[in-house]
Amino acid sequence: MYRFLLTPRWWGINLFVVLAIPFCVFMGTWQLGRFEDRVQTHDAAEKQPAPGTRPAKPIEELLPVDTVTSGRPAIATGRYADQFLVPGRKLDDRSGFYVLNMLRTDSGKALPVVRGWLPGKPGHNAVPAAPTGTVTVTGDLQASENTGTTGVDTEGGLPDGQLGMISAASLVNLVPYDVYDAWVTLQDTGGATGGSAGDKAAGALRPVPAAAVQGTGLDLKAFQNLGYTGEWFVFAGFVLFMWFRLVRREAEAARDLQLGLVEEEETGAEAEAGTGAEAGAAPGSGAVAGTGSGAGADKDAVGTGTV
């Protein structure tokens, strides 16, 4: 009854099932692992002390930025150089922009420093000038932004002096010196020491809080991984269900053929077709027979009369 499983058509179906189910299970397990990693990272981050409460260290000792060093206070010394405005950034549900200055350190590299946030759009508000001379800043360390970071402008076409994404990859094309693959945000807008006495207008800048490292919290992406896990396992079950359904239907058809149920149906149909043909031909036959009999009777009658 199940010999049809050895036919070429079913060899293809079986091969697809054998490959599809393990693949779906593998992908579902991988997505589940991603979700569990996020949960473990989130738990580990909550058990650690707040990054801002840890002692500040030189920027070189905290690089590269990872889940441990992100948010920790970093110290850097140098001179402020180029300034950029980063539009489209929100603070307390208000639209505004970051004021970012490049701090050229003694190592030859420059560290992007977000001195603060201002409401409105760039060009509409006066921007406090950066301190001059040699300064030492302490800011919360942040990883370079990417296209998935909230507030990043990936469309381009910004005016000169504006920056859509805070990253070494975008800044290296705008300045003639090397850039650290990280940036810091000052929590004290007057926290620079050394140089000039500072600008009183600097108080207008609001500090930008450090953001949590992407992929370390139970955010929407974490639960997307969990949803994808369910989808892959459901698809594996669907493939197996459809295979059993096709086998059952094929087996029932083979059983009916073996029992002769299919031949009986075909014989009955042929018999009905033959009966209908005979029924349709009966009136014509009667007419022909009647006509022949009448003609013969007439001839007999004529012959009898003649005699």
Image (tube, rainbow, N blue to C red):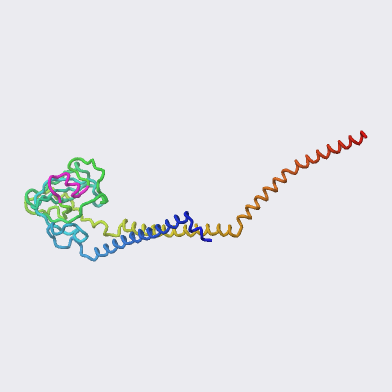
Tell me the residue at 6%/49% (across/down): 133
- Image quarter where the C terminus lies is top right
Residue 193 in view of the camera:
yes
Q: Position of residue 103 (x, y in %)?
A: 12, 50
* Front position in the image: 179 or 116: 179
- Measured from the top left, where is residue 187 in percent x and y? 16, 55
Which span is picked out in magenta? 165-179
Query: Magenta region's main secondary structure?
Result: loop
Residue 22 screen position, x and y as percent: 38, 60
- Relative to 67, does residue 292 appear above or below in the rendering? above
Q: Considering the image in quadrants, where does the N terminus appear?
A: bottom right
**Closest to the observer: 241 or 300?**
300
Q: Position of residue 232 (x, y in %)?
A: 38, 58
Q: Is residue 264 above or below residue 86?
A: below
Q: Would you say residue 115 is visible in this rendering? A: no
Give residue 41's quadrant in the image: bottom left
User: With respect to residue 200, does 30 lie above or below?
Assistant: below
Q: Residue at x 79, y 41 (%)?
A: 289
Direction from residue 121 to residue 294 in the image, left or right: right
Question: Of residues 245 and 34, which is closer to you in this image?
Answer: 245
Most distant residue in the front direction: 307
Q: Nearer the viewer, residue 233 or 193?
A: 233
Magenta-drawn stretch contains 171 = yes
Q: Is residue 81 magenta?
A: no
- Looking at the image, which residue sits at the far bottom? 47
